[in-house]
Amino acid sequence: MNLDEELRATLLARAEDAPSGVGTLDAVRTRARRVETRRRAGLAGVAAVVGIAAVTGGPYLLAPFQHAPGLSAGAPSTGTGSVGSPSAPPSSPAAQSRQSTVALAAPAFTPVTFPLTPSWTPPGVDQPTVGRTQGLVRLVYLGQSAYLIAQVTDQLGQSDWTPANTQSTKVGTRSATLATGTDRDGKPAVRITWQLTGGEWVDVQSSGQISATQLKQYADGLRSQPMPPLPLPFTLTLAPQGFQPAYQELTPTEFHFCLAPPDEIDGDSATWVCVSHNESNAATEGQRVQVGPDQGDITKDGETVQLTVHRPGFEFLVTANENGSLNQEDLIRFAAGVAKP
């Protein structure tokens, strides 16, 4: 069993008692699951849980986007199913019962970027992915025998392991705390935390075969400039106009991504629109709809509408609030524009 599989198993076993702080990858994923659970209960407006996190969707590198033939790149959605849309779903009372509150247009949102740039990475981990959830942005490095998480957050959370040793140190000119010990799975764990001049906290943690010296070297190498955007494993043809990334989580086999109005990306909102992909997505049976050239099923769970797109080799989900920013017809148009790069 590799590290990622072990993390998944731990998450499933400890989903209810995991800490609220995002200290390890388990906690990152558990917090995302809890955010999603709140929305599914009608309190949040995030998106459906699939696999390890809440749903997602939308490109890091915003160009080039693959526009559907005959679709103007800047043409907004009118909710009327006009010719040239990525999808022309059949009319239904549900689709025509209300208008969308936001237009669909060519994506123009700002990609999520990590606010610091690493200059050195410990051996044994893969290239990082960038994640975002309420109040924090993180870099996640996975490997066969170790993982590393670096995050910048407004509030410093607690780790889910008790340090055996804690000492004061410095990262550059900033006072820092270095903690070492063993995590709940019995693996060596290291954590270093410090505060930036603007008040944000930097929290860097590792588990497995990464030493305290190596983690300190990684921390010392974080430069005070944003990283260039990293590519996403999908593209969008359309997106809700003016929306920005509110949630993002990526792994080698999954992605989860949500868009929301700029003033609602760090709060609970019924306007969120999310897309996710999981290689083990379960088959669904609901209202059958046409999503571009693909078949889809729409199901409802409380106030949540979930559209499963059965695209060969790339099945994915689009999730929104039933009374959210997009009506059913525009939700289908949005889904039709999701593609592999």
Image (cartoon, grey):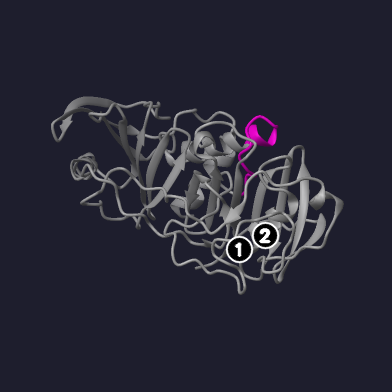
Instruction: Specify the principal SS of the magenta part.
Output: loop
Q: Which region is colored magenta? A: 37-50
Q: CA distance from mark 2 to mark 1?
A: 7 Å
The residue that mark 1 highlights is: 337
Q: Amino acid at mark 2?
A: Arg
Helix, strand or loop at disc 1? loop
Foreground residue among 158 and 237: 237
Above or below for 237 versus 138: below
Q: Amino acid at mark 1?
A: Gly
Identify the residue at horizontal 35%, vertical 39% (top origin): 151
Drawn side of residue 148 relative to residue 293, left or right:
left
Q: Which labelled disc corresponds to residue 333?
A: 2
Please rate how many residues cluster around mark 1, counting C-alpha atoms within 10 Å: few if below 14, some from 14 to 19, many from 20: many
| Residue 43 on the magenta span | yes
In the rendered image, residue 291, in percent from the top left (x then y), is placed at 71, 64
Foreground residue among 36 and 339: 339
Helix, strand or loop at disc 2? helix
Q: Are marks 2 and 1 in contact (CB under 8 Å)?
A: yes
In the rendered image, residue 59, in percent from the top left (x then y), is placed at 48, 57
Above or below for 336 versus 129: below
In the rendered image, residue 104, in percent from the top left (x then y), is placed at 61, 54
